[in-house]
Image (tube, helix red, strand yellow):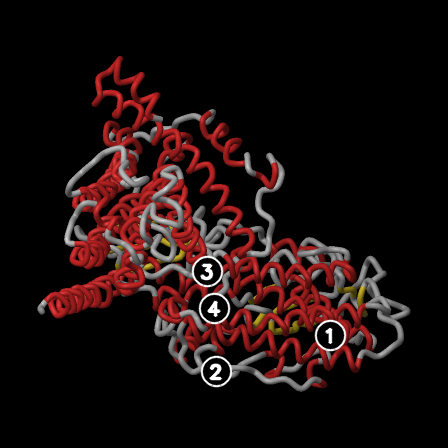
Amino acid sequence: MSALHGLAARLLGDFGATLVLGAGFILLYLTFNVLFLIWLERKVSAHAQRRLGPMEVGPHGALQTVADMLKLLSKQLVTPLATDTFTFLFAPILIFIPTVCLASLVPLGGASAFAEMPNGLAVVVVLSGITVIAIFMAGWSSNNKYAVLGGMRSVAQVVAYEIPVLLSALAVVLIAQTLDLHAIVAGQRVPYVVVEPVAALIFFIGITAETNRAPFDIPEAESELVGGFHTEYAGMRFALFFFAEYTNMLVLGAVGATLFLGGWRGPGAEAHPWLGPVYLLLKAYAVVFLMMWARWTFPRLRFDQLMNFAWKLLIPVALVNLVVTAAVLIAVQAP
Amino acid sequence: MTSPHSTDTLDTYTLNMGPQHPSTHGVLRMKLTLRGEEIVAAEPVIGYSHRAHEKMAENRTYAQFLPNTSRQDYLSGMIYNFAWVEAVERMAGVTAPERALVARVILAEFNRIASHLLWVGAFLLDLGAATPFLYAWDDREAILFLLESVTGSRLTYCTGRFGGLSRDLDPGFPDRAREVLAKLKGRRDEYVRLIEDNVIFTNRTRGVGVLSRDLCRSYGVTGPTLRGSGVAYDVRKAEPYGAYPRFDFEVPTREEGDVFARYMVRVLEMQQSVRIIEQALEQLPGGPVLLPDSIGVKKRLKLPVGTQYYAVESARGHYGILLVSEGGTEPYRAKFRTPSYPNLAVLTEVMPGNMVADAVAILGSVDLVMPEVDR
């Protein structure tokens, strides 16, 4: 990697090299990740339901998503009449950008993330809030009542769940005394999930809601809103929403792993730097697997129940957790 | 277009749910007037699968109409098929042999369980849980295999004949049936853990879409929907027909009248059906399954002049057949009283004030089969 970087740096300068290589590498990996996650989702759902899932294309259906993507690529891109064209076309792209930016912030190993940020966690929180704008744009511009309902639900939901996510992340910040993701990982001799189990649980519930996954998938509740905000999207544009959902799952899972599961740390990761990304991905995929498991087990919440759950339960609990954390820290550091 | 239910004002809008919508179960169109996500008025629009079954009955001989019966309610086709057969038998003044009567009960009750299982799956899918759907269909599949081995078809059965059944139960049938029953019983705990013990499920269903006893009565609601509101009305007990009086079973009811009550009633009903089938398998007599001088084989069966109403308990409620004969080979008039029609009509009363998500739950909870509403 560093040799490649040196070569590119001679051509593009140091900044340009990092940008091009980083973006290229992240996009490449995220594409692979989506193909893998969709396959994994189908397999997890199948085995939860005593089926086999895709078995035909490739060994155990591993190439099924590739075939599906090719099909989606070849489909006609339908733009319904009376849509707000620019917004309609831009939404699927915008939904993708913040996730990719997020991916570049997660520390992959002892010293490397693609983008270094002293206040990384703050940027993570801000970026993860942008996705909802894209979802609302998609819903609003589609000129479809189901899509508008889906978009409105999505905004309300993400606004509500952003707060507990933020509060639970703040508990970690209190302990780590920093917003720097590197330092947070470095501080975790013991993963913070042991110290902050409540915050970890709230964070997990929060990111499940933020990625619009069941049981919080009300913006696209197919039995109520047909397809929700992406009802009117076809072909590759629809696939981009799909891409974004699965990318978001992995990236937020990786953020969760960084905050609570010790990030890239693991046995031997200090001595062998290449193990860092492996550990991080393993942990992130474990979180993603949990999200899939939940999806194929629970029914969907109703909209008002979902809001009550966030405002009346998660936020107070997260606040109490934050205060208790602060109190304990003061008590420990007092003498 | 203005309709009597229209409450359009500036702060409301109309949302057409259906006729092509994932959770209207067929071709129902719900015209919802919404304020935000809250339902102000709901108007069911029906008729998308109207096939004029009643008119068709007037243009066919009694035997020719047999295949139509199971296509009115394709989920409990066996029960509808036997209802037509028994209605004609009663009018003709013949009784099927003992073995056929008991076999009809066995097949009909299996069909009832299959219908309820499908409902459990589809209802949970409406609530956003995909896994119970496949569990329920897996169990239903076992029943379909069993029924296919007797009747030759999986869904639209036509095994009833005037004076008996088209085929006898084969000698291995009771054992295979008991195997299926054992499988169903074994799954009960799993369903409880997956569905009833789930907080999200109970929150979505308890206290939602409450139908009061009086409301049900005034609309003529029947079946599990009525029994979920605390009225123990079941045609099998109220006006026993066929071999039902010989079997010992209960009519489960719940007092709450909400979506959860309707779910529980169906689950308890499946257990009662299992009980009935077990008794019937014990008592299954030998002998022929079709009257030797069967009127069924006569192509030009003529019924005596008269009018007669015959009712059975289908998986959805009170299914009645009014037959008017003028002595010809075809009925002068056949009127079908299908249970889903009033069950759907009552929904206009309970929908307002609920959320869109509840509309889906309530709609799912009454177990509509649209071809049966439209006929």
Relative depth, front residue between A158 and B243: A158
Q: Name which quarter of the figure residue A195 lies in.
A: bottom left
Q: CA distance from mark 3 to mark 1?
A: 49 Å
Q: Chain of mark 1?
A: B
Asked if marks 3 and 1 touch (Cβ < 8 Å), the reply is no
Residue drawn at (79%, 72%) of the image: B174
Q: Amino acid type of disc 3?
A: Thr
Give how far across and how far down residue A198 sits, in percent: 27, 65
Q: CA distance from mark 4 to mark 1?
A: 43 Å
Name the residue that disc number 3 marks.
Answer: A297
Q: CA distance from mark 1 to mark 2?
A: 28 Å
* Helix, strand or loop at mark 1: helix
Residue drawn at (41%, 67%) of the image: B201
Q: Chain of mark 4?
A: B
Q: Amino acid type of disc 1?
A: Arg
Question: Same chain for the residues at labels 3 and 1, yes or no?
Answer: no
Question: Same chain for the residues at labels 4 and 1, yes or no?
Answer: yes
Q: Nearer the viewer, mark 1 or mark 2?
A: 2
Residue drawn at (60%, 70%) of the image: B187
On residue B231, which mark appears?
2
Judge whether residue B126 can be spotted in this image. yes
* Helix, strand or loop at mark 3: loop
Q: Earlier in the sequence, mark 4 or mark 2?
A: 4
Q: Nearer the viewer, mark 3 or mark 2?
A: 3
Name the residue that disc number 4 marks.
Answer: B195
Number of marks in the image?
4
Give how far across and how far down residue A184 sits, in percent: 23, 50
Q: CA distance from mark 3 to mark 2?
A: 34 Å
